Image (cartoon, coloured by chain):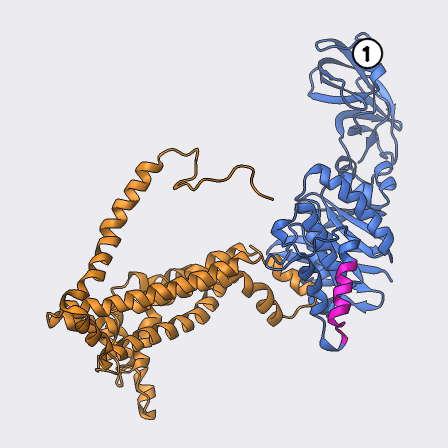
Amino acid sequence: MTDAVARRWRFVEPSALPGFKPAMGFTMVYLSFFLLLPLAALILRPWEHGWDHVWKVISAPRTLDALKLSFGAAFFAACINAVFGTIVAWVLVRYDFFGRRLLDAFVDLPFALPTAVAGISLAAIYAPNGMVGKVFAPHDIMIAYTPIGVMIALIFVGFPFVVRSIQPVLEDMSVEVEEAAATLGAGRIRTIIQVVFPVIFPALTAGFSLAFARAVGEYGSVIFIAGNIQNVTEIAPLLIVMRLEEFDYAGAAAVGLVMLTLSVVLLFVLNLIQSWISRRGA
Amino acid sequence: MSLEVTGVRKSFGRFPALDDVSLLAENGEFLALLGPSGSGKTTLLRVIAGLEEAETGSVRFGDEDLLAKPVRQRGIGLVFQHYALFRHMTAAQNIAFGIKSKPRAVRPSANQIKAKVEELLNLVQLEGLGGRYPSQLSGGQRQRVALARALAIEPKILLLDEPFGALDAKVRRGLRRWLRELHERTGLTTIFVTHDQEEALELADRVAILKDGKVEQIGTPEELYHDPASAFVFDFLGDSIQMACEVKGGMAVIGGVSAPIIGQKPDKDGPATAYIRPDGFQIGPKDGEGLGARIRDVLLAGPDARIDCVIDNDGAVEVRVPHKAAKGLAPKDRITLKARAVRVWA
């Protein structure tokens, strides 16, 4: 069946709510100054010394290694956060115990703590002579100043995103649904996999995306624990800073542009997955 | 086989939710648990299902000790007030969930499961809607999916926790009748929790009335209505009017007129409270005998005429009389009220 009246394309659907123009105008101005202009600058800047220079910078092994480390470590950190953040959210929502509220408040600490402070504390703990590092050092396992150290810093900064994304969904999901599964004869594992997990999955993807995005751009905490060894523990944001210090603005912008492109593509894909999942049985 | 609950106790903190509850549901019986909120009826249902642990007492089905089994092995179907459907699964997937959860050795084949789901969809009159998600179904349809899902595991007992509580009045009434028919067809021992006395009296073979975690009375709807064991039961099963009276030689004297006492009679004379249904009054002219009253409003819609009046030096009551007795009455008229028969509990 077709609509009797052919629908004309419209920029804005009619709405009873007034104020679209001022609100939209404000949004555009705001976005322009704080988002679009800086991004436009980033997109335009790399080309000032020509395409060759851009290619030279981004194809250099040092750049490639840094990008690989940044995206790889961020991905693994987000994966680890997805697993443990879900468990933490579960504990905070489903059980009532002494100190639950305090624990709940702790989850936000990585948001509030200056990242440099976090980086220095992590480095102190995981360095070969630190509290945790001491345990692993005799077995020749180094944590600080290796890619593992980078990952630990990224886990730290991304952690709250997963917990805070999943928490409201779990709170919203009534215990009755799990009880129903139990009365129908399903065991705990089957209940979690088939009943609980599908419900929290969209939120989990959202939390994963946020944790991942945050980790890719993280700078402050990583540089203290990474040791910043070229081609090994040098992250892309640090490389950008190095290029800036060498006054190679075009080079810095080129690395930044690559990061931006990769991030946009990845976030877009994650968003697609998320909306595809939540459309099923929404 | 019958379900036998004996001496079950359960408290939440210091609040006793179930206080020595015993009852018996015969094989194939439709038993309603009726009571105000906080009376422990849902807790009792959850103890039977295994979602709540009893502190003492036993729950047996035939000679099987149900309390010794974990929830998932009890084989009891439970329907929740708010459906508790799996929202990411279609109606058919919801219904199949229980069958698919069976251990591999006893699980039917995929084709058998499919056939079973179709059969259940037919049973709950949702043919062709198996592919819908819960969000695409109405409240009544969702509850029928939940019922089919519970029936899919072929439970020994079916428990329904205020299944129509979240639905509107008209849908409720339709589903009520339908549920009764379904029960007749399946013959499954069913326990039904409700706070709606009309629903309980209409549906159940027997009704157990709960109050503060105790069974107040248990019996057929007829027994309960005509022979209530306590003032609470009388009050809970219908509108009731309470009046001060003087018991004298097996009669209750209200406003100088004595009325016979039905049911148990108090053993000693003296002041007491008389309980009367709204239709237990006779209206007389203003100079008649009985309690003097002034009419506030006469409501003529409905099977009976309802007369809202204020008794002199007392509160307002709404009495029900046949339409012809209400003829000619108007607001501000003075009348007299005489109770035909009353109940008195010591």
Give whichever of A248, A180 is nearer the camera.
A248
- Residue A243, image x, y percentages: 15, 72
Subunit of label 1? B
- Residue A238, image x, y percentages: 21, 72
Give whichever of A46, B25 is nearer the camera.
A46
As drawn, the residue found furthest toward the top would be: B287
Q: Quadrant of the N terminus of chain B?
A: bottom right
- Residue B41, image x, y percentages: 71, 50
**Is A128 situated left or right of A8 in this image?**
left
Residue A143, quarter of the rendered image: bottom left
- Asked whether B117 falls inside the magenta stretch, the response is yes
Name the residue at 34% across, 87% down.
A136
- Which segment is the magenta one? B106-119
Decide if residue A28 is in sight here. yes
> Can you say whether A247 is above or below B160 in the image?
below
Quick one: which chain is orange?
A
- Asked whether A153 falls inside the magenta stretch, the response is no
As drawn, the residue found furthest toward the left would be: A247
Name the residue at 41% across, 66% down.
A208
Residue B113, quarter of the rendered image: bottom right
* Tint of chain B: blue
Give whichever of A59, B87 is nearer the camera.
A59
Type of secondary structure dominating the magenta stretch: helix
Judging by the rendered image, the residue that carries numbered circle 1 is: B327
Q: Name which residue type carries label 1.
A: Lys
